Structure formats: C-alpha cells, structure tokens
Image (spheres, helix red, strand yellow):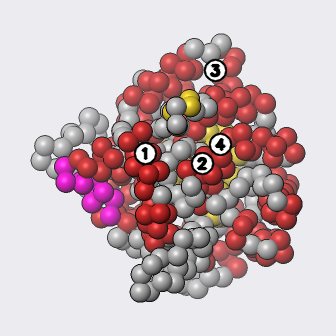
Amino acid sequence: MDTCAFYDVHCHLMNLSHPAFVSIIESMRHRPREVIYSQLASFDYLASSVLKRGGEHLRNLLAVMDNDCADILFLMEDDLAGQFSASKGGRKFKEEPPLREGVFRMAGQDFSSIVLTPLVMDFSTPSSLKPDTYYNRTPQKPIDAQIIDVMYAIRKYAAARPGGVFRAYPFLGVNTKNHTLEGLSSFLSTWFSKYTRDERVFEQRFKSASRHGAEIEAHDFGLFAGIKLYPPLGFDPWPDDPEEREKVELLYSFAESRRIPITTHCDDQGYRILSLDESLLYTAPSRYEAALDRHPNLVLNFAHMGTRHIHTIRGKEQADWRKEIFEFIRRYPNVYTDFSFIGVEPRFYEELAEVLAGMDRDDAQHISRRILFGSDFSINLLKIRSYRDYMEYFSQASLPNEFKLRFCSENPRNFLFGNS
C-alpha cells in the first residue's frame, strides 16, 4: 500500500456516449425562462466562459470527452507530466510539471500515487419530456454501459502503464427511483459484494485489473469504493412517498452498516432534467437532515462545498448551503465536503482561508479535517484549461501546507478508508 498518496475524490471518466443529452436539451427547451434566468443570474459560472474566445473552453472539453475513457486517463497523466504546452497567448505555468520521474510533487510533499474516484453517473432516468422529433423515443442510457466503459478503462490503463501514477477506485451512481425495492437491494449487493475499507485490498485489485479481459466479471465487484448521488437527475434524498422513502432508507442503511462513502452533488448548477425549484429542493443540504438524524454514522460528502451561483431567486435571498454543510460537520461524525470545480478560481482558496481564519481555532481545526480535494475533471474544463492548471492553482493557494496536505491526502484517505 502507498504510504503517501494524493487523492482526487471527485472526477469523472465520462465520454460523449454517457450523458443523456436529449433529456437535458428537452428540459432546457421546455423551460427556456429558467435556463435564461439561471445563466444570467450566474453569468460568471458558465455563460461568460463558454462564450469566450469562440467557445474555446467548450471545444477543449469536447476534445477530452470525445476519447475512450482509458485515453482520458492517459491524457490526464501526460498533462501532469508536462506533455502539453500552453497555446500562444495562453497562461504560462508558474511551476515545473508536478509529475516528474514517477513522483507527484504537491504542497512540499512527494506522492507515490494519485488516487482517483471517478464518479459513475446514473443518467438512466427517463425524461418526462418526449422529444417532438421524427425519432421520438427517449434514448436509453443504462448505467451498465457506463460501468463497462469505466472498468475497461481501468484495465487498459493498468495494463499499458503498470508503473503509472494513477489508482482508480470508482463510485457507483445510484438513483433509487430507477429501481424497485428488490432490484435496488440486488444492485447494491452485487456491486458491493466484496466491498472493504482496506486500501491495500483496493490497490491490489487495481493492479491485477490488467490480467482480466473486457468482460464484466466477479473481479469488478470489488472495485467500487463508494456511491454517487445526483439530485438534479431526479434523486430525492428524503421522499415524502412511503414506497420511495423505503428505498432511500434501504440505500442509507446499506451504506451506513458497511461504512460505504457517499458523494452527493451540492451546488445549484450542473446537469438538470428537473425544474429549477425541484432541483434546488432535492439538492439542498437540509434535504439530508432527516436522513442524517436517522443514520448519524453515514459517511457523506457534500460536493462543491454547497456553492450557490444564484444568490437571489424571484427576489428571495437563497440559503447559504456552505454554512449548512459546516453545521452538519459539527453535528455528525462522518460528514465531509469537497471543493471540486470551484477550485477553478484561485480566489476560492483566498475565501476559504478567510473563512477558516474567521473561526475559533478549535472549530477551524475541526472543519479543516473534513474538507476534501476534488477537481471535477473533465467537467471543470468549462471554466479552466487543464487538469495541470487545476493542480497548480491548488499548489499556489494561500493556505498553510498543513491544510493542503489534509485536504489532498489525510482527509480523503480517512473518508475512503479510515476507521474513525
């Protein structure tokens, strides 16, 4: 087992075949006022970036997502090793490539590996909005197809680069609405039949992946390290309907008893097939309060640190989700938050440093032990040029190295594999 690993707990191995583009487009087409309002109200989030320099960020994202998932892993590693150069007039890197001679250097520390947790998304929720095109069947996006792509990518990478720096332990996308109670139980039991919080076992399984063929086998059932939830695609963390509540309770009980970590989307943007109001209702940290009261030992990560890009809706000031998450961290022993995507702006780290400095020392120490490094690659390319840029912004951040090492190594290791 690696004694010192860097962890990116929020990234994706997602190619163009995975997202449910038709469902997303139909949702936008049938709710144009919401789309226009949300983009204008949060212009700095995506609109300003996508429109810049002929859509350069969007084209750069598509240049990544048009690849096989394994090639995305190769691209990420090669980028960290300095194999891509800045375009003419583009931002110049301030530091040497962080990956040199097989060692990843960050925050004054040498890391022997980078642990990635690619989040498999469940895009299989059928859209309620039927396309009015000639081929008017809603495309099917079975999650099994994405699982196969990610597993094959892991095998291909492990075989091609036995000395590579990456270790990939994916999270399984779950939307309880897409399962019967019995089907959900079977789905979870199948993919987590060999689950363990022993990192040595995960590393061995990853290294042995190259010896397996392209078929999904029992071996694969031990590679999932957690569960991914995504409310804007229809997952309700605490449904009012008794039958749906029973399925959600099953999910939480299953995860809590085995200490399987969960990452849930938690900002007011992202892929959305629901109305804005419904999406915000399901995504809000407060929607998990009853679940945490019932399952206080749930290992739960609120992604994106609850960032609100839209601060006012219909003249009403929106709740500060970050404060709600920090309060959950104070109350529950296994609640975490990551700063995936929002690290695309260097000023985020300045704001985080100010927030921690404004707390009393004990509180700041406690909160700082529940913050996780995440990139949201490749989705973050909508706002940043490269994986290497994201890493360099973190390296250059005005935070003590003590905190940086907690965020990128100590805390995520505890989130994924710790016994506390």
The residue wearing badge 4 is 284
Q: Position of residue 21 (x, y in %)?
A: 45, 69
Amino acid at circle 4? Ala
Query: Which span is picked out in magenta?
Result: 53-62
Residue at the spot 55% in from the left edge and 84% down from the top edge: 213
Crowding around mark 1 (Cα neighbors within 10 Å: few <14, some 14 to 19, many 20+) is some
User: Which numbered mark, 4 or 3, is in the foreground of this view?
Assistant: 4
Q: Circles 4 and 2: CB distance less than 8 Å? A: no
Residue at the spot 23% in from the left edge and 47% down from the top edge: 52
The residue wearing badge 2 is 277
Residue at the spot 80% in from the left edge and 63% down from the top edge: 244
Measure the C-alpha gap from mark 1 to mark 4: 19 Å
The answer to which quarter of the image holds residue 306 is top right
Residue at the spot 52% in from the left edge and 79% down from the top edge: 138
What kind of element bears circle 3? helix
What kind of element bears circle 1? helix
What kind of element bears circle 4? loop
Amino acid at circle 3? Ala
The residue wearing badge 1 is 37
Please give left or right for residue 59 compared with residue 122 in the image. Answer: left
Q: Residue furthest left?
A: 88
Lower position in the chain sequence, tag 1 or tag 4: 1
User: Which numbered mark, 2 or 3, is in the foreground of this view?
Assistant: 2
Q: Quadrant of the C terminus?
A: top right
Measure the C-alpha gap from mark 4 to mark 3: 23 Å
Amino acid at circle 2? Asp
The answer to which quarter of the image holds residue 29 is bottom left
Q: Circles 1 and 3: CB distance less than 8 Å? A: no
The residue wearing badge 3 is 364
